Amino acid sequence: MAIQKHDNLINGQWVAGAHYAPNINPSNIADVIGDYTQADAAQLDAAVKAAQAALPAWSTGNIQARADALDKIGTEILARREELGTLLAREEGKTLPEGIGEVSRAGNIFKFFAGECLRLSGEIVPSVRSGVSVEITREPVGVIGLITPWNFPIAIPAWKTAPALAYGNCVVLKPADLVPGCAWALAEIISRSGIPAGVFNLVMGRGSVIGDPLVNHPGINAISFTGSQGVGNRIAQQCAANLKKVQLEMGGKNPQVILDDADLAQAVELSVQSAFFSTGQRCTAASRLIVTDGIYPKFLGAMKQRMAGLKIGDALGAGIDIGPVSSRAQLEQDLSYVEIGKAEGGLLVAGGERLKLSAEGFYLAPALLTDTTAAMRINREEVFGPVASIIRVKGYEEALREANNTPYGLSSGIATTSLKYASHFKRHSQAGMVMVNLPTAGVDYHVPFGGRKGSSYGSREQGRYAHEFFTTVKTTYIAS
Ligand code: UN1
């Protein structure tokens, strides 16, 4: 069968870029999902200009029409969740149930923001001057550049695009080069939703070719980015130099605290889920398991037993718990961190080796290291794979200290049956999201998402808090 070619969406037209790149299935590298075009800087410029041209009408247009279009997009995504979930699992490597779950999240996000179109409100306040009244309203920011990562190929494009459009902005979306399939499918759905040409544009390609031109383009008013801290840092500096609004979601080194009084089975289950599900490729994954002395031997034994029962295999296979790593480069990074952890004195007690299955893919047995300390690189740097380490501590106070002993601050979790410790941890954990007896990863779509310290920069994503980034405030004074 001929490999299907996929083009960029610019000003309502499908346009071929300079060349095409194959989208490879990480479960079976002989399987090519399709060819996806790669834009150059000139095409990127055309997309930004199309968005600028579409902005005056869209930003002041009828909000019922906007709500209807977003609702239609959400409805189609949800109706096609099995098909799109299969595409997602095939191109990114998370399991089919995880892929379908992510597609459902994307559909629900569009539905949520369809409603938000009608809920944006302002304020009328008295003036300190007689005969004057004051109105505070929110307006669109303008043309927004969205740069999304490979680990959530549809949910993150959805959670940036839906609020951007709901609040009246125009969009240029650059999805991760590794997983353009779901973003292309989303663009195709948007192209038939009734949203006018130029309001939403898809530009696929490498960050090294079109990343800087997008961030630095004078027609771009704001950038929302999810990805690594290194790239995020550079984007922040470029945006500051050009006085652009910027929102960054970057990595995590999230702690999962297990206290002596935890329910053992629950603690093991949520640790395995946090650390290894979605192949550990979530910025919310727990990579530091901080375990108190009293439960340590039982917890370690039960973890090893649970990990031995995990089924690793083709993302589309029945009963698979963990799919492959998404790319060869990421697999190499994961393996190198297992070696780094060992060289620093950590003990590899489970997994950590590449698995050879019937098809050639990037399979890695989830790795667990013990005897690690907070100062080690394995506990400071984000691995972004199914690699977790245990830090053994004496009691709750030390556990809290270690949990916060990180340059990151996205999510954190505690497993305990004690109300006292749970309440204290909720209050004192230096993270944007705190989970009590739940995995650190797996969040709702209608509430704020984001972190502190080196994990996030700018205002929160998701839920109604998204308006802080995607709108700008206007204060109007009226003589009465
Ligand atoms: C989740 O844990 O459900 O890139 C979402 C990421 C995050 C999303 C995590 N922005 O992994």
Image (cartoon, rainbow, N blue to C red):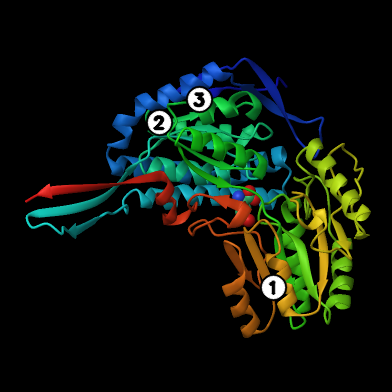
Q: Position of residue 127 (x, y in %)?
A: 16, 57
Residue 413 lies in what quarter of the image? Answer: bottom right
For the question of whether residue 267 can be seen, the reply is yes
Front disc: 1 or 3: 1
Judged from the image, the secondary structure of the residue bearing numbered disc 2 is loop
Whether residue 150 is visible, yes or no, is: no
Image location of residue 51, percent across then percent down: 41, 27
- Image coords of residue 129 (percent x, y): 12, 57
Vertical arrangement, residue 198 with respect to residue 166, above or below: above
**31 sits to left or right of 475:** right
The kind of residue tagged 1 is Leu
Q: Which residue is mark 2?
A: 199
**Residue toward you, 117 or 449:** 449
Q: Is residue 406 above or below residue 383?
A: below
Task: Name which of mark 1 and mark 3 comes first in the sequence.
Answer: 3
- Amino acid type of the residue that numbered disc 3 sits on in the rendered structure: Leu
The residue where tag 1 is placed is 400
Q: Which residue is mark 3?
A: 9
- For label 3, the crowd category at 10 Å Cα-Cα, with few meaning under 14, some 14 to 19 and many 20 or more, is many
Q: Check mark 2 vs ligand 1: CB closer than 8 Å? yes or no.
A: no
Which circle marks residue 392 in the picture? none
Q: Which residue does the image show at 43% across and 55% down from the upper left? A: 465
Alpha-carbon span between mark 3 and mark 2: 11 Å
Q: Is residue 443 left or right of residue 387?
A: left
Mark 3, secondary structure of its residue: strand
Looking at the image, which residue is at 66% across and 84% down?
Answer: 418
